[in-house]
Amino acid sequence: MSLIRGTALQGYAELVGELGGELDPLLDLARLPAAAIGDHDTFVSYRSVVTALEAAASATGADDFGRRLAMRQGLEILGPLGVAARTAGTAGAALHAIEQYLAVYSPAIAITVTALPRTRLVELDWRIVVRRPPPHRQAAELALGVTLRVLRLLAGADFAPRSVRLRHRPLGDPAAYRDYFGGPVEFAADSYGFRFPAEVLQRPLADDGDVHALAQQYLSRIAVPSASATADAVAELIRHMLPTGGLDLDLVARQLALHRRTLQRQLAEQGTSFAALVDQVRRDEAERYLRETDMPLGQLAGVLGLSEQSTLSRASRRWFGAPPKEVRRAARSVSQQVKNQAREVKT
């Protein structure tokens, strides 16, 4: 299983509703929590996103569901990566930043921008990098639709690809694809992507070098390392993956491109273990949710990747020496005392 940020489905609920569909059954089918939809800070299963898109297209009868959803998304779904792209000096530099750090948004997908020999064209390829991916026609059309919008933002509203490539056959009227993408579309191709003039890469942007440098620095810091794993990086990945309910050592090792034994050895060298990190992350997240939210305990158990509320109760007694309700009550009491003290200081 590979992951993608919740903003991959930004606008999904609204579009399903406008097309006369029912949201909850689709999310249940895809095993997606409603709170994750559109949330950049939450990772969800990429396979679940693919299922949600295909199911929505089928349920609503909208063959172009992915393309329609793309009209509701843009560079903002990439979060800090979008900031790095928007503040680059040229369109080419922006695409390079996206290519370099796309795994921060999702390790399940990748793009490559290359110059075509003996032409004045470049080729942008989009691909899924998970093994044995499920059928993903809607997901691919969503990705290319968003990419087109990003290219028009970076290169100008007049941007039009010389050609568009789709690995699948048309879903509906082939002529609608040309109208949508603004160029000829090749179906049943060997890859997904665009070809466009190389000069597009030289188009200047509203260069903001300071902000761009800060965004690049931040992305470098949070990017998951491929050759080694620090405890902090593993903990961060665990935190994002807990709500998926499928967290285990092999899964995390695959996300880090490491063998499970290599990951275990590296963590042992840092004085910890995978199980200890999972427990610590769960403890920290439980404390934060109990202190800051009114989330029902059954739902909190799911967010923490625990099987049921009773498991959360036992863990809470081990972590904090008290059941979750008492931990929440004590946290609220402390918070209220702090507020009272703050008011006293002001007066």
Image (cartoon, helix red, strand yellow):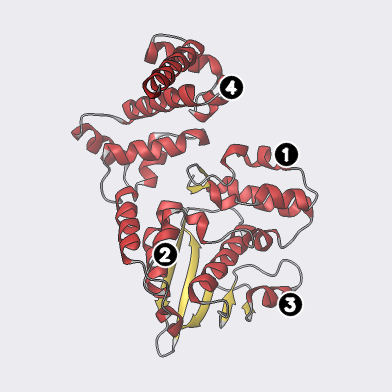
User: Where is mark 3, residue-wise?
Assistant: 175
Q: Amino acid at mark 2?
A: Ala
Alpha carbons under labels 1 and 3: distance apart: 32 Å
Secondary structure of the residue carrying tag 3 is helix
Alpha carbons under labels 1 and 2: distance apart: 36 Å
**Crowd rating for badge 3 (residues with CA inside 10 Å; few <14, some 14–19, many 20+):** few
Q: Amino acid at mark 3?
A: Ala
Q: Quadrant of residue 319?
A: top left
Alpha carbons under labels 4 and 2: distance apart: 39 Å
Q: Quadrant of residue 279?
A: top left
The residue most toward the bottom is 118
Secondary structure of the residue carrying tag 2 is helix
User: Where is mark 2, residue-wise?
Assistant: 85
Alpha carbons under labels 1 and 4: distance apart: 21 Å
Q: Is residue 201 left or right of residue 186?
A: left
Residue 75 percent across, percent down from the top left: 51, 61
Q: Earlier in the sequence, mark 2 or mark 3?
A: 2
Q: Nearer the viewer, mark 1 or mark 2?
A: 2
